[in-house]
Image (tube, rainbow, N blue to C red):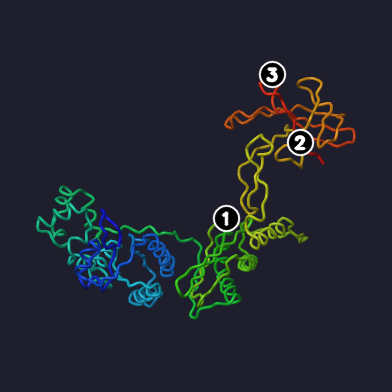
Amino acid sequence: MERSQNTLRLSAVSPAAARLGLTAGLALADARARVPDLTCLPADPDGDAALLRRVLADFSRFTPMAAANGPDGLILDVTGCAHLFGGEGGLVDQVVVRAGRFGLEVRVALAGTPQAARALVRFGPGGITPEGQDRAAVRRLPVEALELADADLQALRRAGLKTVAAVDDRPRAALAARFGKAAAWTVDRVLGLEDIRITPFRPPDPYRVDRVLMEPISTDDDILRVVGDLLVDVCGRLERESLGGRVFQAGFFRVDGRVRRVTVQTGRATRAGPVILRLFRERLAALTTPLDPGFGFDQVRLSVVRTEPLAVTQVDLDRRPDRAADLEGLVDRLSARLGAEAVLRFQPRDTHIPERAVRLVPAYEEPGPGAVQEETVPPRPLHLFDPPQPVEALAGLPDSPPRRFRWRRVQHEVVRAEGPERIAGEWWRNLEPTRDYYRVEDAAGRRFWLFRQGLYGDPAQPRWFIHGLFA
């Protein structure tokens, strides 16, 4: 039950309640007057939606073309899939069995188009409609099966059109003139005369292989063995099309309907099955929440989520080891074992401010667009302080390098200096002060990267900072 217009109303009814004459939308007081011992529970739309998503994910075992249909329905495009389940009757039976494992009572209709199936399951007997009989089956339904606006349905009933057949016998031009073109199109779609394909909740990956198991598996060795077999199939397809994978995902379907997905990524495109299987082994062993098989997995799916061109490479005659490949393989294994955020690398950014010139990203991510460093840009130190550390400096002239500076209570006499290199603040950051950078060397041979923040003549007095150390 839920509150609607300051009245508690039934939001859904069980089959037993429906047989007693109760319907959704009926006021709770009227329902209790008809059935005094009625049991009611508060509506939980969020929980219902979560359950529907679980069922939708599980029903992708029947077809990749699956989508939600309203708050309490699913539509499956099973074109070309029925023979895998013993025909249309076997497919319908398995759908009912799988729904029962979620504690659901379902009605199933199989027709030529999604709209015809929806009309038959919601306003008719459901079941399997023979091929080519959609129109005849839908014509027997009440006019409510068209699911037009309430005002349009009332107008049709007042005109004596109480069945879909009566509306179908009317010229479409008259319907379009009275109710609009959308109503005429709806009639054709519900009758199966026009097919509008569904949009799946998750578009199927172009490279995906499934293995439906006769007996559920639960041990790690069996799971990895099945994943290895699927890798042989999918890597063969990638090789025939000169492609490699960057992101691989394994989906494990439990007997009770729960689905667990595990993803691994690589630093560069690959189709080496043993390498990918080793990443899955590392990832499964490092899961924070272990892969709980419950009563076992009865289906395993392997998808290549992201592909890239990968041509065949010629092996050098001297068979020198590929150091880059060894490093990337190590990065992939560490990322799979420790997590993506544990293995990072620097990526350049398009800015002149030194402390913002790079950012840390997962090591397997592609290099993004960064700042193009010209040859005229002075060298930067390897060791940067973030934030820069303040120093006390003394300069001979306003725009000259410092003669001496004090840092960490140690006095440094400057014997050599280069600069200035002027870096203006970014205008979108509230006009940060201009910086003049100097590369200086003290009497002991230590080299520093100093800058003066602000210009002489500004309202605020310029300050000196040390930003980095040269090796």
* Residue 129 falls in image quadrant: bottom left
* Residue 48 falls in image quadrant: bottom left
Give the residue pinned by disc 1.
Answer: 308
Q: Residues within 10 Å of mark 2 (few under 14, many from 20)?
A: few
Which is more foreground, mark 2 or mark 3?
3
Which is more foreground, mark 1 or mark 3?
3
What whole-number distance in Å separates the C-alpha atoms at marks 1 and 3? 56 Å
Type of amino acid at the residue the image marks with label 1:
Glu
For this orientation, the residue located farthest to the bottom is 215
Secondary structure found at label 1: strand
Q: Nearer the viewer, residue 149 or 203?
A: 149
Q: Residues within 10 Å of mark 3 (few under 14, many from 20)?
A: few
Side of 167 relative to 357 (left or right): left
Quarter of the image with the C terminus is top right
Side of 340 relative to 254 (left or right): right
159 is higher (above) or lower (below) than 31? above
Q: Position of residue 107 (x, y in %)?
A: 30, 71
Q: Residue at x 16, y 50 (%)?
A: 173
Secondary structure found at label 2: loop
Give the residue pinned by disc 3.
Answer: 457
